[in-house]
Image (spheres, helix red, strand yellow):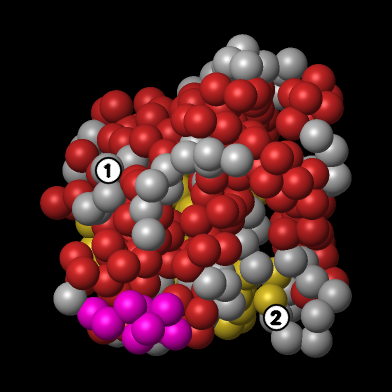
Amino acid sequence: MNKDIHDKLIALTDEEQRIINGEYEVNKSLYTDNGQFIIDSNKLLGKDELIDIRKHTRFIHFPKHKHNYIEINYVYQGSLTEIIDGKDITLQKGELVFLNQYITHEIEAAKEECIIINFIIKPEFFDYILGFLENDNIISSFLITTLYTNYKEGEYLYFKVSHNKKIQSLVERIITELYTSSVMSKATIKLLVGLLIVELVKNSQDVETYSVDNYEKMLIIQCLKYINEFYQKGNLFEISKELKQPHYKLSKLIKKHTKKTFKELLQEKKLSKAVELLKVTEYPIVKIIDLIGYENPTYFYKIFKSKYGVTPKEYREKN
């Protein structure tokens, strides 16, 4: 790790200094305006930011709380003891845990030598990553549940990967990039996080998982994976046949757990893919319409403008 960044990580923050000076409880107003202790990403992230890091505050016990974002705790040095849904977990140097926004946890007071990095990540940051992840792995299931369903059960993924030098190197590069922002930082961070997740998928034998086992949830995850892969020509009857479920039952489950119909989810996926292609390719718009599976350009223009407030051409020019 770069010495300047290392020095920033071990230095006392203003909050830590106040604790040393006798502030014996966490100042919740730094984290939320809500009466409940639900940490708000708007308190921690700048405007329009989807990801940032924050050094965990040492010397004080963090009481039970949730977040309205995905959090990753990474142990830079020392250790960290968390109580997650009543279960004690002690992370060692180089280990990390993914926490979804419905998990309840508390954190024991960390000693001075224990440096923990908290990644604050809005769920939509992961939208693009799902595009290149294989469907059948624990991380894609975790992200799909978090991004697209209405489930409110806590889940976590605990990665015991301190031995993996490639993963450690990627995490350190992400931390470095977040601490030394540049013109290319946002694109670089997305790339590095994507590479990190791919490496974590490769090391799924080193992960401990926790989630509420739910049959309906697994059906919904399969539907969302299907949409992610077959959005061009996918339809409800095909996935119903694949899952051996009546289409009307699957339709009700999708609406129940996502608050959207199968058709609406399919349309959202197509539009998000169109936006991606507008940003990163020079394809003519008519080709993009064909690639995402629409046969009627007029209809595409209508729903695109309804969602984004501009035409595809105007969107491309702005982005």
Q: Does residue 223 show up? A: yes
From the viewer's perspective, tell me whether residue 217 is left or right of residue 311: left
Disc 1: which residue: 134
Q: Amino acid at mark 1?
A: Glu
Q: Amino acid at mark 2?
A: Phe
Q: Quadrant of the C terminus?
A: top right
The magenta stretch is 245-252
Query: Which residue is at the far left?
Result: 205
Residue 224 in picture, x, y percent from top left: 39, 61
Q: Quick check: is 48 in the magenta stretch? A: no
Residue 124 numbered mark, or none:
none
Residue 100 in picture, x, y percent from top left: 49, 66
Tags 1 and 2 touching, CB below 8 Å: no
From the viewer's perspective, tell me whether residue 137 is left or right of residue 290: left
Residue at the image point whose x is 85% and y is 75% from the top: 33
Residue 304 in picture, x, y percent from top left: 72, 44
**Neighbours of disc 1 within 10 Å: few (<14), some (14-19), many (20+):** few
From the viewer's perspective, tell me whether residue 38 is left or right of residue 95: right
Q: Is residue 154 above or below residue 296?
A: below
Residue at the image point whose x is 67% and y is 46% from the top: 299
Front position in the image: 165 or 90 = 165
Q: Is residue 19 above or below residue 129?
A: below
